[in-house]
Amino acid sequence: MPANLLALLLGGLAVTSQADQVSRLTGAEAIEAWVRLKGDAGGAITYEWVSGSAFGVPADGPAVLLFRMESVTVRRFEKFGPASYIEKNYACRLYRNAQSGEYVDHFLNPLTGRDVVVMGRCSAAPAVRYTPEKVELLSDMKFDSSALGGPMQLEKLSLGDVTVIRRDVRAQFVSPSTGELRRELSVDSFTTTPRALANKKLRMLAPAYHWEAVGGWMADLAMGDRPGRMLWSIFGRNYRTVEELPADFRQALVQRVPDALQRPLK
């Protein structure tokens, strides 16, 4: 990709092609970077807000935009040793109409013509233990993932005055709602600066965040045996306080789930 085009895609930031290089972060170095990218290494609670879209890609027809969504992940990293943390979090999601953008509790699935109920919801994720040797779930949940069972692995792309950190994850699990085996591929990308990443005094980097995933149909869509996949694409960033979250999102969330931003992290 031409350097000037890449600079445009990264928001007009200058790119020095001579400094472009790809390297890998692993073990303790990767964990410390990950914690600062996803939260606060000092143990403070953070609020990761994202906004994005979900597309349906049927095998027998053209892809369509199904809905838009926004969510917040309330997260805390608790340090218990050198480059060793336990992550606790829960997430709350709201849906937006694909055309109007208004917050909705149901939408019309254009692939089936049926109404889909999608109430605002919050759910806790299993706690995750990070050590230089291994990343693991603190749960007996059956979840196979390339991100678990070994050292943290990240890719660092140096682009002059921009640094992009990426992680791709291949996972498979049995859906608790349908009982089917699901396989997914996701990619996390964080855009920050070399100076911020190198400054160990910065406990929270608050980078621009992008996540994409390809997987099976969301159970709520009731797609039956129709072959196809979904593509999820979201952008967002971290905030230190509830008050910094977008006001319209915060208001819509609290209307639907009054204690959404007050739940304890367990």
Image: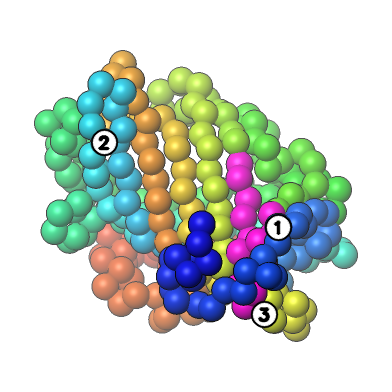
Judged by its main secondary structure, the magenta piece is strand
Q: Which residues are magenta?
A: 155-169
Disc ID at residue 22? 1
Dot 3 amino acid type: Ala
The location of residue 64, given as percent across then percent down, is 23, 39
**Callout 2 amino acid:** Ala
Residue 119 position in % (x across, y down): 27, 48
Q: SS class of the residue under badge 3?
A: helix
Where on the picture, by quarter, is residue 199? bottom right
97 lies above or below 194: above
* 52 over 248 or under it: above or below: above
Q: Amino acid at mark 1?
A: Val
Query: In the image, which is nearer the foreground, mark 2 or mark 1?
Result: 1
Q: Mark 1 falls on what kind of element?
A: strand
Whether 157 is among the magenta residues is: yes
Residue on which disc 3 sits: 196
Q: Residues within 10 Å of mark 1 (few under 14, many from 20)?
A: few
